[in-house]
Image (cartoon, rainbow, N blue to C red):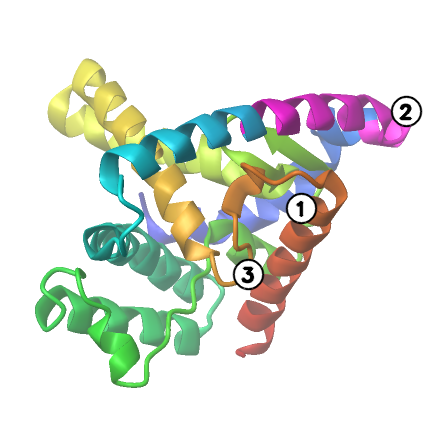
Amino acid sequence: MKLLDFAVLPRLMVILLPWSPATALASQFGQSPLETFNHAVFDFNNRVGAAWESLTDWAVNPDGAADEAGSGLRNIVSNLINEPITIASGLIAANLKYAGNAAARFAINSTVGLGGYFDSAADLGLPARHSDLGGALCAYGVPDGPYVVVPLFGPRTVRDGFVDLVVVNALLFYALSKAAGPSAALALVLGAETVGVYADAIAFMPVRPIPLGVAQSDFDTTRSTYLEQRRTVCDDLRTGG
């Protein structure tokens, strides 16, 4: 994939997003069709999240003790997934501060932090500041589109959901299929997406204490918190914050 292709993507999104099915529905009928869908999926995600939390609490931490190993695993996933994505989004948005911070964190945590198990970069004054490709597109003026709750993946805007679940996976599948064949590429993409859900939960924990809308009882609070977090990421990327 050439760099020119990535430069064209934000402009394509500006053109195509207003014509997406979700945007058309919201424009024609207001938010009611999406709201009904969103509430139903939100309730489903809550049930799945509660079951998952109960299972992992029992399996990983049955006695309620501090889970240092779990924290280390979260750090490793964040280092391997969130930092490279932040580097890419910072470069696409021409925000060298974001990209540089993530690159330095990745280098330090991959070495001194033993592959990311320890967040040594934070101890050296480089706190985590995660962004993603949806935020980079926002910095180019691509609109959010309607708010949608995706099964298992939680809250998204149409822009962020399209980039996260369609564009990134399509590019990943294309690259992997060239090297390993379609079947292996599909398996790797599904595995990466599963890890990516976990990584996304980690990335925005400081802003969304219970990420992705899973195991939250208040739909409106989850929506407003998520959209506020997205605006913060977008503003930081756009202004160089």
Residue 54: percent from the left, percent from the top?
40, 32
Magenta-colored stretch includes residue 230? no
Mark 2 or mark 3, which has the lower sequence index?
2
Label 3 neighbourhood size at 10 Å, few (<14), some (14-19), many (20+)? some
Q: Is residue 119 above or below residue 46?
A: below
Tell me which corner region of the image, top left, top right, bottom left or bottom right, holds residue 125: bottom left
The percent coordinates of residue 105 (x first, y second) are 26, 71
* Front of the two marks 2 and 3: 3
Residue beneath disc 2: 29
Q: Point out which mark residue 210 bears.
A: none
Lower sequence index among marks 1 and 2: 2
- Classified by dominant secondary structure, the portion drawn in magenta counts as helix
- What amino acid does circle 1 point to? Thr
- Which element type, helix, strand or loop, lies under badge 2? helix
Quadrant where the image shows the N terminus: top left
Residue at label 3? 207
Q: Write down the region rendered in magenta.
A: 26-45
Residue denoted by label 1 = 222
Query: Between residues 68 and 138, which one lies in front from this camera angle?
Result: 68
Secondary structure beneath label 3: loop
Q: Give whichever of 121, 1 is nearer the camera.
A: 121
Residue 167 position in % (x across, y down): 45, 35
Residue 168, image quadrant: top left
Q: Check the image and report above or below for 57 versus 47.
A: below
Q: Residue at x 33, y 75 (%)?
A: 100
Q: Is residue 29 magenta?
A: yes
Disc 1 and disc 3: Cα gap in Å? 11 Å
